[in-house]
Image (spheres, grey):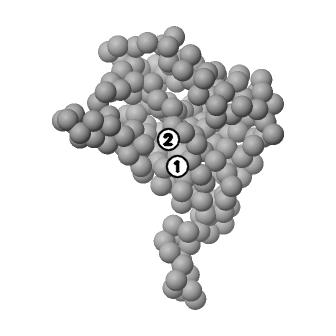
Amino acid sequence: MKNVFVINAHEEYEFSKGELNRTLTQLAIDHLNGTGYETRLTTMKDDWNVDVEIGNHQWADAVLVQTPVNWMGVPWSFKKYMDFVYSFGMDGRLCAGDGRTRSDPSKQYGTGGTLTGTKYMLSLTLNAPRDSFDDPTQTFFGGISVDDLYRPVHLNFRFFDMEPLPTFACFDVMKNPDVENDLAKYRTHLAEVFPGAG
């Protein structure tokens, strides 16, 4: 991997200005640039262009999405980004439709991806505490993992035949933030996942 496209999906609200997501985004870019990777960045505040964003995905060896978990999903502005960029990319640039053809009924739905070999990584910030996941005694999530919660996002990238890298998450960021520990853990995570451009 050499080229990493970073997306900061945070949407700014009065109660959440996005400082942690900006800090994590910059930490990732600094690590990547410092270890030989080329980076590009798009934020939801940018006046992004669909064709440029599709090109960023095609250019990338890996896509790193930094996002808060908003109402169990991504912020509305990133969903809008996906609706436009990913839908227009179905012309063969990100995928060849859904993969099925009338001439070959054996081809399955979701097999049209054209970004084979491209990786992706999710870095999430959540208000939920760490112990609310992966524990069937927890009432709300009932034993699911963070990756289970974000399965629709994983499936979006799988639709393009991209491969997941290990997910990173900062938990309990509003009620019990531990930013210094989270940043230290993220540095370790980045060093393991992106040890240096090869």
Q: Which mark is residue 78?
A: 2
Other residues around mark 2 within 10 Å, as few (<14) / some (14–19) / many (≥20): some
- Type of amino acid under label 1: Met
Pointer 1 residue: 82
Q: Is residue 43 above or below residue 174?
A: below
Q: Is mark 1 in CB contact (under 8 Å) with mark 2? A: yes
Residue drawn at x 40%, y 34% is 69
Q: At which x and y percent is residue 160?
A: 59, 59
Residue drawn at x 56%, y 47% is 164
Judged from the image, the secondary structure of the residue bearing numbered disc 1 is helix
Q: State which quarter of the image contains the C terminus.
A: top right
Residue drawn at x 49%, y 41% is 78
Q: At which x and y percent is residue 17?
A: 46, 19
Residue drawn at x 32%, y 37% is 134
- Type of amino acid under label 2: Phe
Q: At which x and y percent is residue 100?
A: 53, 77
Residue 52 in view of the camera: no
Residue 180 in view of the camera: yes
